[in-house]
């Protein structure tokens, strides 16, 4: 019973991170700022949801369940390495393509922004 509650909480936190990443991708103004939630929040959401899956798999503890949970965590470790690498490669492609970062366009002067 306690393990089920823990799994539900960890899964809900993971889905919250996924939702935040999706909203960030839709709401941020340019290519570079959209990559931040795509890289960070999706990785954290995957970590939480896969951890919930690994914990749920350990509900009936045996050797096969333990090995499966370890494989799930190995997948998480692989994503932790590949996600920042892929995000960096995408940003590098954007820089090489000549995409310029978004800048704020309004009537404010530098003195107004600094204050």
Image (tube, rainbow, N blue to C red):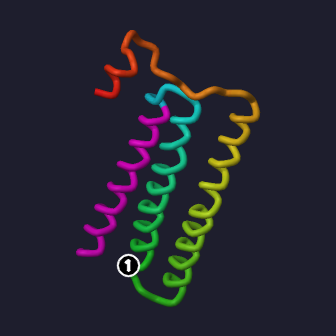
Quadrant showing the C terminus: top left
Residue at 33%, 56% (x, y): give it.
13
Q: Is residue 30 magenta?
A: no
Question: The N terminus lies in which quarter of the figure?
Answer: bottom left
Q: Which residue is mark 1?
A: 59
Of 15 and 68, which appears nearest the observer?
15
Other residues around mark 1 within 10 Å, as few (<14) / some (14–19) / many (≥20)? few
Q: How many marks?
A: 1
- The residue positioned 23% from the left and 75% from the top of the image is 2
Expressed as whole percent of the image width and height from the top left, the position of residue 90 reads 68, 42
Left or right of 83? Residue 66 is left
Q: Quadrant of residue 64?
A: bottom right
Q: Residue furthest right?
A: 96
In this view, the residue in front, 96 or 84, is 96
Q: Where 3 sits versus 106, above or below?
A: below
Prevailing secondary structure class for the magenta stretch in the rendered image: helix
- Identify whether 37 is placed above or below 109: below
Q: Is residue 85 above or below residue 18?
A: below
Left or right: residue 38 compared with residue 96:
left
Q: Residue furthest top?
A: 107
Judge from the rendering whether residue 14 lies leftward or rightward of residue 8; answer left or right.
right
Magenta residues span 1-25
| Point 42% across, 86% down: residue | 61
Q: SS of the residue at dot 1? A: loop
Q: Residue furthest front?
A: 111
x and y, in percent, of residue 62 in the image: 46, 89
- Give the percent coordinates (x, y) of residue 29: 49, 25
Residue depicted at x 25% and y 67% = 5
Q: Is residue 3 magenta?
A: yes
Residue 7 at x, y = what percent? 33, 67
């Amino acid at each position: 019973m306690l393990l089920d509650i823990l799994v539900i909480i960890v899964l809900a936190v993971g889905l919250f991170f996924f939702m935040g990443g999706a909203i960030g991708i839709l709401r941020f103004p340019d290519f570079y700022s959209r990559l931040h939630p795509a890289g960070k929040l999706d990785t954290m959401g995957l970590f939480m949801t896969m951890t919930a899956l690994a914990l749920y798999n350990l509900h009936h503890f045996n050797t096969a369940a333990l090995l499966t949970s370890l494989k799930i965590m190995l997948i998480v470790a692989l994503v932790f390495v590949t996600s920042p690498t892929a995000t960096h490669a995408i940003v590098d492609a954007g820089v090489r393509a000549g995409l310029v970062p978004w800048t704020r366009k309004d009537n404010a002067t530098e003195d107004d922004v600094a204050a």
